[in-house]
Amino acid sequence: MKHFYMKQKVFSIKDRYKIFDEEQNVIFHCEGKLFSLSRKMKFIENSTDTILFHFRKKILSLFATYFLYDNEEKQIAVVKRKFSFTPKVEIESDFGVFTIEGNFYGHNFSILENGDEVANITKKWISWGDSYEMAIHDDSKTAFLLALIILIDRIFHENKNKHSY
């Protein structure tokens, strides 16, 4: 199991995330495209500056739906917010079908594959901006799971912002 830390940049025109390893080295970063209706983002490996994934939001959708593409523009996952009385996200991907359990609004949740926990996410409350600690249990899916965590964060931030006055 590996631990990672994610911080969202507070004062930025576009969405920006940095993901750190246990030694506080930036290993991935993610940035949104300025003036994008579909809220496009790219997930980049920091050491090589290689784009690993692209995200794009479905524009006309009742509930948030994101598409995840690999660096060759092949769709590899769909992340959907589903209607229910408790927050629910459905993830279908080339890597498998995932579910999420936990307290989304408190930002403490787990990603499960076939009932087994593959990632655990906990918000750090005493920090500048949004900061999360993430434990990834499956090394073969590390980059993919970290990209999913960013998408889940986007879905719940969008939902929170729609209802604030």
Image (cartoon, rainbow, N blue to C red):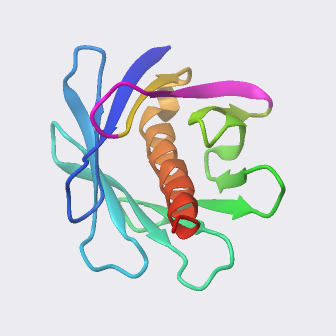
Percent x, y of residue 11: 20, 53
Left or right of residue 12, residue 75 in this image = right
Left or right of residue 46, residue 63 in this image = right
Relative to 163, does residue 96 appear above or below in the rendering? above
Q: Residue furthest right?
A: 85
The part of the image, by quadrant, that contains residue 98 is top right
The residue sitting at 50% across, 56% down in the picture is 157
How many numbered marks are there? Answer: 0
Q: Main secondary structure of the magenta part?
A: strand
Relative to 96, does residue 83 appear above or below in the rendering? below
The residue sitting at 47% across, 66% down in the picture is 74
Percent x, y of residue 75: 52, 66
The residue sitting at 30% across, 59% down in the picture is 15
Q: Residue furthest left?
A: 48
Percent x, y of residue 4: 38, 24
The part of the image, by quadrant, that contains residue 62 is bottom right
The part of the image, by quadrant, that contains residue 23 is top left
Question: The magenta stretch spans which residues?
Answer: 115-129
Percent x, y of residue 122: 52, 26
Q: Is residue 161 magenta?
A: no
Left or right of residue 126, residue 11 in this image = left
Q: Residue furthest bottom?
A: 60
Q: Is residue 128 magenta?
A: yes
